[in-house]
Each structure stands twice: as structure tokens, then as C-alpha cells.
């Protein structure tokens, strides 16, 4: 398996524009996470999907952020409109959730977003 | 909010020395995991220790967990320049499916 695949790797956009980040989780994994990493705040969980259903979106900053998982092999994180403070590295991670929850997460390489 | 807090924030050592990083957390956990991140890359899972375990080894890595003190340590023995990276602890709280990460320790191993 190629691992978790994110696209694009880098995105530079102007303030006010819509940004869409994409993620392909590892085949067979039933849990998907979107994280945001900044120097100031570290790694923050934005949203968690289980079996394509959003379970916890309490980390989504505000209404400008939305995430979807239309099927088990694809998820998107959309920011509309984007603002300079959204500049960060966005990571997608997937795992195989089991009852005992002793499983690891596999991370993609991240999308470095710069909003100017 | 951050569940895990690593200490120190940065650590600089020479090749061959041992590196010890600590992590403290606040709530009861199901397990604690350590991840590594090279500059500009994603996080890579290193080791997982369950709440009923006290120590675990994997190659040059040794992890301890003290649930009474809500703390964990990661020891890298005989460090190499290639170990230079940021190291994060992540906790899976009891009853939750998500991982909460600390801000990490930046480790620099000089040749």
C-alpha cells in the first residue's frame, strides 16, 4: 500500500479564495482524521470520521471549515473563504479502529497551506 | 487543549549518547503512543504502550509508562545523527477514539 496520500503537497492562495485539500486513506482503514499543525498550537485535531461518518468535529475552527468523506477511500477538507491565519500544515491520518482501541495512526505527508 | 506535554522542548546531544524525552498527560488513558516527525514530513508511529503496561522495548527505543504520575518517557539508546527529528507523545483517552498530541521535543544528534 502507498500509505495515506494527500494532495496537493503545497498550496499558496490569496485570502478569500476557496481551498480544497484531499486525502486518500489506507485501504481497509475505517477511521480518518484531519489534523492541523502550527508552531504556536502544535498538532490540533480538526475532525474524525469513522466508517465515513463524522464523529467528532469539535476541533473545526469555524464555519469556514468543512470536511466530507463521500466514501471509504476519499476525504476532503475545504476552507472557504481562506484567511492568512489558516496558514499551516494540514495532515490526514487513517487507522483501523478496533474495539480495544490499541491501534496506531498512519499519517500522510501533509499539505502546506500558505494564505497570502 | 493539549493532553500530552513533552519535556524538554529541545534536546541536543552527540552521537552515541542516550536521549530521554518525557511526556505528561492529564486524564486517564487507554494507551500512549510515540511518533517521530522528520522536518517537512508526516508523523511516523514508533511505539504504543497500553495503560496496563509499564515498559516496552523496540530496537533502540525504550518506553516507560507511570499511570499514577500520568507520565511516560522515551529513551533512545546509542543515538545516531539519523535520529534527528521531532518526537511527539499522543494519548488515547479512555472511551475516546481520537489521539491527542503534545507539542513535541526537537532532538538534534550531532555527529
Image (cartoon, coloured by chain):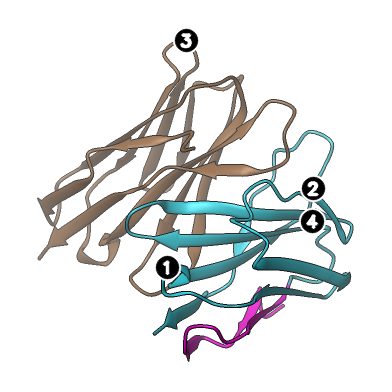
Which chain letter goes with mark 3?
Answer: B
Q: Tell me the quarter of the picture where residue B37 sits.
A: bottom left
Chain ID, cyan in image: A
Q: Are marks 2 and 3 on the same chain?
A: no
The lab-note entry on whether marks 3 and 1 share a chain reads: no
Provide the residue span drawn in magenta. Answer: A1-24
Using the rendered view, name the quadrant where residue A47 is placed. bottom right
Alpha carbon distance from label 3 to label 1: 39 Å
Q: Mark 4 — residue?
A: A49
Circle 3 sits on which residue?
B68
Q: CA distance from mark 2 to mark 3?
A: 27 Å
Q: Which label sits on residue A85?
A: 1
User: From the viewer's perspective, is the residue at label 3 or at label 4 nearer?
Assistant: 4
Colour for chain B in the figure:
brown
Task: Tell me the crowding category of disc 3: few under 14, some 14 to 19, or many 20 or more residues within 10 angstroms, Cα based.
Answer: few
Q: Residue A10: give x, y in percent of width and height.
A: 48, 87
In the image, is residue A88 above or below residue B86? below
Mark 3 touches mark 1? (CB < 8 Å): no
The CA span between labels 2 and 1 is: 32 Å
**Considering the numbered disc 2 on the image, is that residue within a helix, a strand or a loop?**
loop
Label at residue B8 = none
Amino acid at each position: 500500500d502507498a500509505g495515506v496520500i494527500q494532495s496537493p503537497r503545497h498550496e499558496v492562495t490569496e485570502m478569500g479564495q476557496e481551498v480544497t485539500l484531499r486525502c486518500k486513506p489506507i485501504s481497509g482503514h475505517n477511521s480518518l482524521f484531519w489534523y492541523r499543525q502550527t508552531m504556536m498550537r502544535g498538532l490540533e485535531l480538526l475532525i474524525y470520521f469513522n466508517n465515513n461518518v463524522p464523529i467528532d468535529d469539535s476541533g473545526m475552527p469555524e464555519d469556514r471549515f468543512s470536511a466530507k468523506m463521500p466514501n471509504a477511500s476519499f476525504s476532503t477538507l475545504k476552507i472557504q473563504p481562506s484567511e492568512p491565519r489558516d496558514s499551516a500544515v494540514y495532515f490526514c491520518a487513517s487507522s483501523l479502529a478496533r474495539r480495544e482501541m490499541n491501534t496506531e495512526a498512519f499519517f500522510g505527508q501533509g499539505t502546506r497551506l500558505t494564505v497570502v | 487543549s493539549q493532553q500530552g506535554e513533552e519535556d524538554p522542548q529541545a534536546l541536543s546531544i552527540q552521537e552515541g549518547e542516550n536521549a530521554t524525552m518525557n511526556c505528561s498527560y492529564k486524564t486517564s488513558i487507554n494507551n500512549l503512543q510515540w511518533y517521530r516527525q522528520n522536518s517537512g514530513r508526516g508523523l511516523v508511529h514508533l511505539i504504543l504502550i497500553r495503560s496496563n503496561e509499564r515498559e516496552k522495548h523496540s530496537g533502540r527505543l525504550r518506553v516507560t509508562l507511570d499511570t499514577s504520575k500520568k507520565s511516560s518517557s522515551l529513551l533512545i539508546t546509542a543515538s545516531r545523527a539519523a535520529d534527528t527529528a521531532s518526537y511527539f507523545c499522543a494519548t488515547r483517552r479512555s472511551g475516546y477514539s481520537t489521539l491527542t498530541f503534545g507539542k513535541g521535543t526537537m532532538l538534534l544528534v550531532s555527529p
